[in-house]
Image: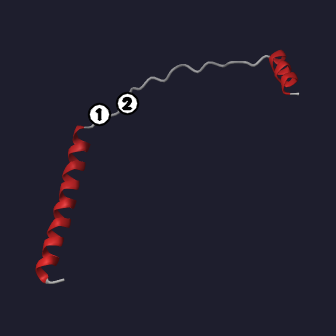
Amino acid sequence: MNRKEFFLISIGVFLTVLAWLVADIYHAAFQERVKDNVTLPPITVNAIQSDTLKILKSKKE
């Protein structure tokens, strides 16, 4: 490889990395921000009845 080919490859890599950085900065600037006041749904406790467990065990056997 002579100097001219090496120079052209170096310029191509530099421009690719520069375009990648610009695209990443653009994406970071315009992405939707996560809100701090996110409300979680209430946790419901579902109790499993013992007769339901017995039915399931009998079906398994």
Colour pattern of the rendering:
secondary structure
Q: Position of residue 17 (x, y in %)?
A: 22, 60
Element at badge 1? loop
Left/right of residue 48 with respect to residue 5 in the rendered view: right
Front residue of this view, candidates 20 and 7: 7
The vertical placement of 11 against 51, above or below, is below
Element at badge 2? loop
Q: Of tags 1 and 2, which is closer to the observer?
A: 1
Residue 32 image label:
1
Q: Residue at x 80, y 17 (%)?
A: 52
> In the image, what residue type sits under mark 1?
Glu
Q: Residue at x 84, y 27 (%)?
A: 60
Front residue of this view, candidates 55 and 44: 55
Q: Which residue is mark 2?
A: 36
Q: Residue at x 21, y 49 (%)?
A: 23
> In the image, what residue type sits under mark 2?
Asp
Left/right of residue 14 with respect to residue 52 in the rendered view: left
Quadrant in which residue 37 is drawn: top left
Left/right of residue 30 with respect to residue 49 in the rendered view: left
The vertical placement of 47 against 4, above or below, is above
The vertical placement of 39 against 22, above or below, is above
Label 2 crowding class (10 Å Cα cut-off): few <14, some 14-19, many 20+?
A: few
Which quarter of the figure is the C terminus placed in?
top right
Front residue of this view, candidates 49 and 10: 10
Q: Position of residue 34 (x, y in %)?
A: 35, 33
